[in-house]
Amino acid sequence: MTPIPFQNSYARLPDRFFARTDPTPAPAPRLVALNRPLAADLGIDPDLLASPDGAAILAGARVPDGAEPLAAAYAGHQFGSFVPQLGDGRAILLGEVVDREGRRRDIQLKGSGPTPFSRRGDGRAALGPVLREYLVSEAMHALGIPTTRSLAAALTGEAVVRETMLPGAVLTRVAASHIRVGTFQYFAARGDQEGVRTLADHVVARHYPHLAAGENPYLALLRAVVEAQAELIARWLQVGFVHGVMNTDNCSVAGETIDYGPCAFLDAYDPAAVFSSIDAGGRYAYGNQPRIVQWNLARLAETLLPLIAPDADAAVALATEALDAFAPRFTPAYRGGMRRKLGLTTEREGDDALADSLLRLLAENEGDFTLAFRGLADAAEGRPEPVRSRFIDPTAFDGWAPAWLARLDGEPGGRAGAAAGMRAVNPAFIPRNHRIEAVIRAAVEDDDFGPFHALHRVLQDPFGEQPEHAAYRDPPALDERVTRTFCGT
Ligand code: AMP
Ligand code: MG
């Protein structure tokens, strides 16, 4: 059997960074989803993972050669309140591999049993949240957005106790790393400056190696994370993604989207949209995401202050400057993305107002965010109906469109060029909540994974027309609307 080519680095860090913990053997491993192309990218033989041995590994029943299973320590602000010790309570890092492109990547099991960080939790995951994370993370990847990936989903053969008994499952997650803002907070909160420094050096070497030789690598690290997060959040907004739990422990220092819990994509455009059942105050609402990620980044900055400069005031001044780099990075990323969504490749005064007024009209008319933008390509080709029909009052679009069409006429590629450009950035297919819920119902209640695989296939090509799958574009009917999602922990 070709082994998994582990090359672990996190396990070489000091013992206080983690607790070595094996997954709990699953009684009856059964693979329900395997990401073969990702396995190949990682240099892992997909046929190995598809074999009974592979299923055992992916359900946590067998520790593969070369793995050094561990649960990582981290802290975090959850909804603004600091918890000095969270850690991997239901996740176990098997190890790292270096992929075909030379990138180091974590392979982690999520839901494979308790760890020393489990607190009152059972360390398990139910099938529903596992399928949800698999679908949404892979959809985000297909949309071109930095994200953790899903290598596999496996049933354990054990039931987990939630409100009801549910099938237990394990998600195999792949990430540039699982190091979070909360990992830095863990050491800082203990006054463990040496820990913060060791972690920072590891993160620089692993994610931002070009910064290592600079004059102040720790300040440069802060700035790099600020920039990565600014770019990431701009991308989220452009596809209508709401993360739902942007706690500092769910904020990756590598700039990937991580921890898909009560996340959702907007149907109707609403900047105040909240899906998470536990986000009563709307802290993590769609439109609040740029603000809240800056709050998280400020918490990262605090942990790095002593490394940034020996003098406290000087350190604060430098860190503040690095944090202030968020807006100059976010705004052009967001604005540029919105221009491309409108079919604009050049930049003119008035473009931002054009985008903002369309969004305002969409909000007023409860227009579907994804389909309205997708329909703009048709409108540019003289067929306004697909986008008009998204508005409660279609004349709202009629009032907006002439200025936009005139603007397209000033583009080098004209309306036709703009239409092609828009179809390449405005997806037709997103993982809509009601579809995900239906897929989960079929899997959990009927052991039918057909709908899961069908939805997954469609989401692999979000920008394609896929006329045979047109129904997957549709927003939920009134009685299909899902307004609340749950963490499923
Ligand atoms: P999350 O909501 O996934 O960001 O998790 C927040 C914290 O709760 C992390 O420390 C998790 O490891 C922990 N946690 C979540 N679910 C469970 C569970 N079922 N058992 C043990 N710990 C959990
Ligand atoms: Mg988390």
Image (spheres, helix red, strand yellow):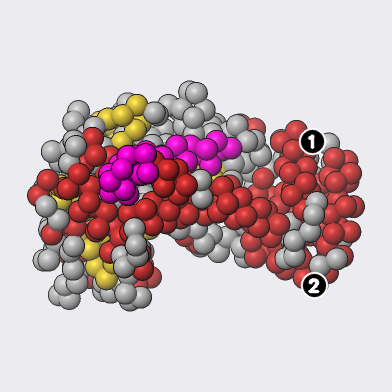
Judge by depth and name the residue closer to the eye, 474 or 225: 225
Q: Assess whether residue 25 is covered by the magenta stretch.
A: no
**Whether residue 417 is situated above or below residue 149 in the rendered picture:** below
Q: Position of residue 428 (x, y in %)?
A: 64, 56
Q: Position of residue 53 (x, y in %)?
A: 16, 64
Examine the residues drawn in magenta and state their main secondary structure.
helix
Q: Residue at x 83, y 62 (%)?
A: 408
Amino acid type, residue under disc 2 in the picture: Gly
Residue that badge 2 annotates: 413
Q: Which mark is residue 392?
A: 1
Q: Is residue 323 left or right of residue 357?
A: left
Q: Position of residue 106 (x, y in %)?
A: 27, 59
Q: In which quarter of the view is residue 445 placed? A: top left
Q: Residue at x 85, y 40 (%)?
A: 396
Q: In which quarter of the view is residue 98 placed? A: bottom left
Q: Quarter of the image containing the N terminus?
A: bottom left
Bounds of the magenta segment:
286-315
